[in-house]
Amino acid sequence: MAQDTRDEPLGERAQTLLRILIESYIRDGQPVGSRALSRESGLQLSSATVRNVMADLEELGFVASPHTSAGRIPTDKGYRFFVDTLLKLQPLDEALSGHIRAQFEAGRGSSTDLIATVSQVLSSATQLAGVVTLPRARSVQISQIEFVPLSDNRVLVVLVYNDREVQNRIIQTERRFSADELKRASNFLNEQFRGRALAEARQEILRQLSEARAHMNQIMVDAIAVAQQVFEAPSEGPLEYVIKGETNLMGVGELSNVEKLKRLFEAFNEKRDFLHLLDHSLKAERVQIFIGHESGYQILDDVSIVTAPYADADGVVGVLGVIGPTRMAYERVIPIVDMTAKLLGSALNSRR
């Protein structure tokens, strides 16, 4: 994903000017001219010398010249070199660090509630979009199953697992089940599967489905018919995530194009490509940064995503991150993401 730019022949002077240009562009959002670079660098270089260095950087692909300005802006390659080589991370100030910690200490409810809180924390701390995947459960044990009849042959399934996590889903049945039938079915399934692993319950359901229904009473037939749909998903399903603060991206100049924002929000909702990116981050050991086209998805060409895996005592269970423009304050966002991932892991461990 990331490009290796360490072998680029950049001298110390060129690196200094590139760093100043990128810091200035991140701060002001305006193309940076040679005169401003000469003034800010403190290197006592003439504007002509700076222009020559900028021409070399542009030829190497680190900066580009917008058509409307004589100044230059960083490219994705320039940002990558900046992040990998020139960036000086800022320690979080005590006020922000304390605020983030307080949000975890105040967090209550299920893991899903905690994930929503963390996503909001990332968004408010960075003024960008925060995303957190739901933790993947390695061992899911069934605590209780309840069914509620809905209209049009639909049934609300309330599945409690690991004694604390609640999952609601709606399934479509072949026929209408009355409340009494569903109650008897849930009683049967609770007797059969309470305390058993989800994968084990699925295998047992499949085994019973293969048996002759003539050997089953009606309660068993009904229960197995409904349970088949409840347990048909794989035990380790696809990543699901909670995203907060998408509207913060509407105030970003580079993303203010309505059509561009619409496509980006659609990508968040459709999830497919975005989930693939987050799934890749699950395998990382530390903070990952995807800058513009590095994500491999055209819809994300104008954004950067800073991610970090979070883990409980048994290992990595999810990933969190911040989505913003390529012109983001990396020196501030990276420590926020890193700290939040560690705090989330600690919070999950305290619930075990």
Image (cartoon, rainbow, N blue to C red):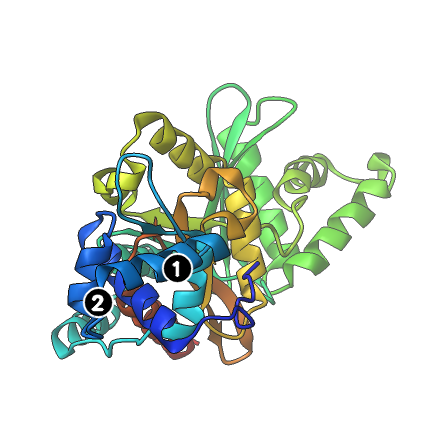
Circle 2 Cα neighbour tier, 10 Å, few/some/many (<14 / 14–19 / ≥20)? some
Count the marks. Answer: 2
Determine whether 123 is above or below 343 in the image. Answer: above
Residue flagged by tag 2: what amino acid is it? Gln
Residue at far top of view: 152
Task: Determine whether, in the image, residue 290 is placed left or right of residue 117.
Answer: right
> Which residue is at 52% across, 33% downward?
180
Which residue lies under the disc numbered 1?
321
Give 127 or 160, whichever is nearer the viewer. 127
Give 219 or 80, whichever is nearer the viewer. 80
Which residue lies under the disc numbered 2?
103
Among the 4 quarters of the image, the one containing residue 308: bottom left
Whole-percent x, y for residue 220 in the image: 70, 41
User: Regarding mark 2 in the picture, which secondary structure is present there?
Assistant: helix
Determine whether 288 is above or below 260 in the image. Answer: below
Residue flagged by tag 1: what amino acid is it? Gly
Look at the image and tell me whether residue 235 can be seen: yes
Q: In which quarter of the image is the N terminus?
A: bottom right
Among the 4 quarters of the image, the one containing residue 139: bottom right
Q: Which of marks 2 and 1 is nearer the N terminus?
A: 2
User: Regarding mark 1 in the picture, which secondary structure is present there?
Assistant: strand
Q: Quadrant of the C terminus?
A: bottom left
> Which residue is at 37% across, 31% downward?
260
Whole-percent x, y for residue 3 in the image: 55, 61
Look at the image and tell me whether residue 124 can be seen: no
